[in-house]
């Protein structure tokens, strides 16, 4: 080994020339000291590559071939490694040690092996990190009549995914509790759930993946199980044989160790022509419910068991591969029900196979597992995995009670998730106590645990995103191994963690915070990263204890964007693992929707929305979904969406009948299907009448609650602005009550700064459903406003898609639209009346239309705007802003004209069937208008009316009594028709 002290001496001289604090350099430093000094230098100055602050030298050795080997500590590997960074690092290290060649190691790998496969160009791909042979996709469930399966997405892939901890039984306190503290209006046990259930899981599913969850996914606290063992609700055509083991429904609760799937039987018969069937019927189902089926274990199980699910939107065909997942619940979709629900199974399948069936389940339900005589008292989706996995039929000692202790639910709950993944997979990747266990035969491709963690910064900086993986795991002999049971290197875990973390940080910096913190890549033996015998990682997205992180974390748009980043990373990782082409990213939801009717036809139009981060996310087609509505005895519309039809353009003409028909649209490409657009509707009254009504769907806003950061007072004061959840918020526990930043954590019951109430925990919080137009239109027709109604998004209307003289009445439904919320950047896209909207409403007024407007912030931002804005407020809306939060009770009384006898209430409180209008506006009349409604508590003006316009300072849809809504609207129509 040759050395050139002069070269490194020059480097040390440069370090020593930095000023009065220059280094005193040992003229003959040891090689280890030279290498350590090089690392120290590169932590202080930019040496051209990232370096973890804890990186250091473990030892230097001379290899058998005489080449110097530098063994770096594990911390060196905590930064993402790229080829160019490694090259610069090694060149500097060679110069520092004055050698021509060396080898550097970390995590017992050459540092070049820290570069993930997907970041390699000069380095060869490491085939040991990929499954042998590249397993072909094997879908468990197929929906043949829905959108076509993606050809360059995740079709046929299986992803195990879970969100954080959950409500669990703590034996030492003899109580059920969260595993973490309530902070900043949420708790970690359900905070990641607000990413996973509404965003991430559906994204993966629309890309073609089957998503497995160890916690219940359905939000409904009720569930109905129908099983042949009870003889109730099930029917057979032909003889089906009962045998084996199966689910046995009985009155809850179950005790720990009881397996509901061990005491019943299942039905089976040889495949046939389809003439033989089983039917399960349930009554009294209402709302959106997850549907689960189940089947038995058979050596010749059919790959194509065909079910029909009858729901409010029609009948959906579902095909299940019964060679996988016997003896557990198999999720087959979420459907809307308005009373009965029916599932039929046919015996039609390939020859010489066996079709089997067991119980079916509608809904998620509430706790059914007792601990010390008590169930959780919570909806099952809030419980930890330990209890769901018992109800799902997992073996106790191998999976859900892996500690085999009677009072260790906390530990079991985080250890069992990886073992559940392994049981899904089965030999040779089964649970670590018995990796040769048969399991359920599901080819799980990847496992991801989604968490947030603790930590505080003293300023407005973020804690940011940490990724945890393990380069080690259990071997088949119980010892530690660096490969999975099938021979794949566990360094695949590092590739996965790097990809997910990189995609999140890149997207968050591009869309939300250019300084978002990228934390380390940790190689740790955390159970959720160490135990799974498939590529896996644990994500710590942000700090739920840090105000700056939560300012974004409470924003639904951030949740969507983070979830999309994770979906993209998983799609890319999975494609790379199997040697497939770069995946196409599914499109964003379409916008600018409009629907109008002419006779018995509806004319629907929309526009694609481009993704500025993903060039491949361009639609190639669209899917139109339809819902036929009927009003119940209370005047509330009911109905469910069908399975949709595919169209290639940006418009469709569809047959419609009397009553109300609603539509939404998704975008399609080879990568999958987008989320749903907003819902638009058209309706025709069966009563005689004249006139056309246009509902402008202008409530687009979703966003976080108000944020305040003053010296000594920091947090999210709900009384300023609740924020607007997207459809619903699953993570809200209650309002923050501790705003003192110096308040210290004592324990989870006294967590200090950010401490929040618990009164709203069991109840998802309603938000912007993007589905208010249908009920609004029906209410207007019921009030006599016209014979028919159409819907148009505010963007389409502002763009001039409606002829000025096409409608007799235009209703602008603003909801809680506003651009400015305390503590957050303004969002101009949420302005209630941008210039295009103002222009089109003026044109409509000039053409003789009447205008109705309702919302919580109708004139507030106009009053703070330009002279043109203020003129529009006074001249078109007939009002000027007086005050925000003008009523706390929501009680309203009429004071003039046809409104005089009206008394009603709108919702201002959390916990109702629709969102709370917590800050209704007081609007004073302008010239030629008068106050027609007042808030009963403050006596401020709640609505103004003029010859052509009625403007309300609260959203009409928050009036929960449909009769009162129609009564108010009847008064509006009477007033507008009484004026010339």
Image (cartoon, helix red, strand yellow):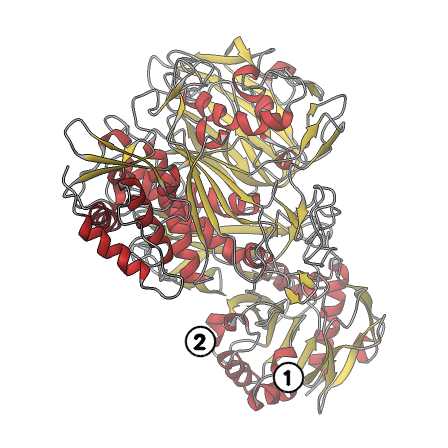
* Residue 588 seen: no
- The image quadrant of residue 946 is bottom right
**Residue at disc 1, secondary structure:** helix
* Residue at x 18%, y 52% (from the top left corner): 6
Q: Which mark is residue 402?
A: none
Q: Is residue 371 left or right of residue 24?
A: right
Q: Is residue 460 visible?
A: yes
Of residues 502 and 44, the one drawn nearer to the viewer in this rendering:
44
Question: Could you tell me if the residues under marks 2 and 1 are in contact, i.e. CB atoms within 8 Å?
Answer: no
> Pointer 2: residues within 10 angstroms few (<14), some, or many (20+)?
some
- For label 2, the residue is 799
**Of labels 2 and 1, the one closer to you:** 1
Q: Position of residue 570 (x, y in %)?
A: 37, 42
Tell me the CA gap for discs 2 and 1: 24 Å
- The answer to whether residue 484 is above or below residue 817 is above
Element on which disc 2 rests: loop
Q: Is residue 160 above or below residue 79?
A: above
Q: Quadrant of the C terminus?
A: bottom right
Question: Is 53 above or below relative to 286?
Answer: below
* Image coordinates for residue 921, horizontal then vertical, percent: 72, 74
Q: Residues within 10 Å of mark 1 (few under 14, many from 20)?
A: some
Residue 609: x, y in percent? 39, 62
Indicate left or right for 823 with 612 as reference: right
Q: Which mark is residue 863?
A: 1
Q: Quadrant of the N terminus?
A: top left
Q: Which quarter of the figure has residue 723?
A: bottom right
Relative to the observer, which residue lies in front, 955 or 318?
955
Asked whether, in this view, residue 965 is left or right of residue 391, the answer is right
Work out whether mark 2 precedes mark 1 in sequence or the reverse, and give the earlier one.
2
Give the number of marks.
2
- 491 is higher (above) or lower (below) than 716: above
The spot of residue 746 in percent (x, y) is 72, 44
């Amino acid at each position: 080994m040759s050395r050139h002290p002069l070269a490194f001496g020059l480097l040390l001289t440069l370090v020593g020339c930095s000023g009065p604090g220059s280094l005193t350099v040992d003229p003959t430093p040891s090689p280890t000291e030279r290498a350590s000094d090089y690392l120290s230098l590169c932590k202080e100055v930019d040496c051209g590559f990232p370096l973890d602050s804890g990186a250091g030298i473990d030892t230097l050795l001379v290899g058998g071939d005489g080449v110097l080997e530098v063994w770096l500590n594990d911390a060196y590997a905590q930064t993402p490694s790229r080829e160019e960074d490694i090259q610069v690092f090694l060149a500097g290290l060679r110069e520092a040690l004055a050698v021509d060649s060396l080898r550097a190691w970390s995590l017992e790998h050459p540092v070049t092996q820290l570069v993930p496969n997907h970041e390699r160009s000069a380095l060869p791909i490491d085939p040991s990190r990929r499954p042998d042979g590249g397993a072909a996709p094997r879908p468990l469930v197929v929906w043949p009549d829905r959108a076509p399966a993606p050809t360059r997405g995740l079709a046929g892939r299986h992803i195990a995914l879970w969100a954080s901890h959950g409500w669990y039984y703590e034996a030492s306190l003899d109580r059920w509790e969260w595993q973490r503290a309530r902070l900043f209006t949420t708790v970690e046990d359900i905070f990641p759930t607000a990413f996973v259930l509404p965003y991430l899981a559906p994204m993966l599913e629309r890309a073609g993946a089957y998503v497995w969850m160890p916690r219940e996914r359905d939000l409904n606290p009720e569930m109905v199980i129908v099983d042949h063992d009870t003889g109730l609700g099930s029917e057979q055509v032909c003889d089906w044989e009962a045998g084996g083991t199966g689910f046995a429904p009985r009155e809850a609760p179950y005790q720990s160790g009881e397996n509901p799937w061990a005491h019943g039987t299942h039905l089976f018969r040889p495949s046939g022509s389809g003439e033989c069937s089983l039917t399960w019927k349930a009554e009294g189902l209402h709302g959106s419910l997850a549907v689960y089926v189940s089947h038995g274990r058979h050596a010749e199980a059919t790959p194509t068991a065909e079910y029909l699910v009858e729901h409010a939107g029609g009948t959906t065909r579902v095909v299940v591969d019964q060679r996988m997942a016997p003896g557990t619940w198999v999720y087959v979709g979420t459907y809307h029900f308005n009373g009965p629900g029916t599932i039929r199974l046919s015996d039609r399948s390939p020859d010489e196979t066996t079709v089997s069936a067991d119980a079916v389940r509608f809904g998620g339900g509430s706790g059914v597992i007792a601990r010390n005589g008590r169930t959780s008292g919570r909806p099952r989706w809030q419980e930890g995995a330990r209890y769901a996995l018992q109800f799902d039929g997992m073996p106790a000692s191998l999976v859900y009670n892996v500690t085999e202790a009677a009072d260790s639910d906390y530990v079991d709950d985080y250890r069992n998730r990886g073992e559940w993944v392994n049981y899904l997979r089965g030999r040779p990747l089964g649970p670590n106590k018995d990796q040769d266990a048969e399991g359920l035969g599901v080819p799980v491709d990847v496992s991801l645990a989604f968490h947030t963690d603790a930590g505080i910064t003293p300023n407005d900086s973020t804690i940011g995103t940490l990724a945890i993986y393990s380069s080690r795991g259990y071997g088949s002999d119980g010892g530690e191994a660096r490969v999975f049971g099938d021979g794949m290197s566990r360094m695949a875990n590092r590739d996965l963690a790097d990809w997910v973390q990189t995609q999140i940080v890149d997207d968050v910096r591009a869309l939300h915070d250019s300084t978002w913190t990228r934390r380390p890549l940790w190689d740790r033996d955390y159970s959720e990263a160490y135990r799974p015998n498939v590529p896996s990682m644990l994500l710590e997205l942000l700090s739920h204890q840090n105000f700056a992180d939560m300012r974004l974390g409470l924003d639904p748009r951030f949740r969507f964007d983070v979830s999309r980043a994770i979906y993209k990373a998983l799609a890319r990782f999975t494609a790379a693992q199997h040697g497939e082409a770069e995946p196409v990213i599914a499109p964003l939801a379409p916008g600018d929707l409009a629907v109008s009717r002419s006779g018995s036809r509806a004319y629907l139009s929309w526009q694609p929305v481009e993704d500025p981060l993903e060039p491949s996310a361009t639609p190639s087609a669209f899917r139109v979904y339809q819902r036929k509505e009927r009003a119940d005895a209370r005047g509330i519309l009911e109905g469910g969406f069908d399975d949709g039809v595919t169209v290639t353009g940006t418009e469709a003409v569809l047959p419609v009948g009397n009553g109300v028909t609603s539509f939404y649209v998704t975008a399609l490409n080879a990568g999958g299907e987008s989320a749903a657009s907003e819902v638009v509707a058209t309706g025709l009254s069966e009563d005689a009448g004249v006139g056309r009504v246009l509902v402008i769907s202008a409530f687009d806003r979703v966003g976080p609650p108000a944020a305040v950061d003053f010296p000594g007072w920091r947090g999210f004061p709900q009384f300023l602005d609740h924020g607007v959840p997207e459809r619903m918020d699953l993570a809200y526990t209650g309002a923050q009550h501790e705003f003192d930043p110096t308040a210290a954590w004592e324990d989870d019951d006294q967590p200090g700064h950010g401490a929040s109430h618990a009164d709203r925990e069991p109840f998802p919080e309603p938000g912007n459903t993007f589905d208010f137009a249908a009920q609004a239109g029906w209410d207007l027709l019921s009030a006599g406003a016209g014979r028919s109604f159409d819907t148009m998004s505010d963007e389409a209307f502002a763009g001039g898609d409606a002829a000025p003289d096409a409608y007799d009445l235009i209703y602008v439904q603003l909801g809680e639209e506003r651009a400015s919320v305390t503590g957050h950047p303004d969002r101009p896209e949420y302005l209630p009346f941008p210039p295009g909207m103002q222009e089109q409403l003026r044109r409509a007024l000039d053409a003789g239309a009447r205008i109705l407007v309702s919302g919580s912030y109708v004139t507030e931002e106009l009053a703070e705007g330009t002279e043109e804005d203020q003129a529009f407020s006074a001249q078109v809306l007939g009002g000027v802003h007086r005050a925000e939060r003008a009523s706390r009770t929501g009680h309203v009384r009429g004071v003039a004209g046809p409104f005089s006898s009206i008394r009603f209430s709108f919702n201002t409180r959390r916990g109702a069937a629709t969102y709370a209008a917590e800050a209704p506006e007081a609007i004073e009349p302008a010239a030629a208008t008068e106050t027609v409604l007042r808030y009963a508590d403050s006596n401020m003006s709640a609505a103004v009316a003029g010859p052509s316009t009625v403007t309300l300072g609260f959203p009409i849809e928050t009036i929960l009594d449909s009769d009162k809504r129609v009564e108010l609207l009847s008064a509006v129509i009477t007033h507008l028709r009484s004026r010339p």
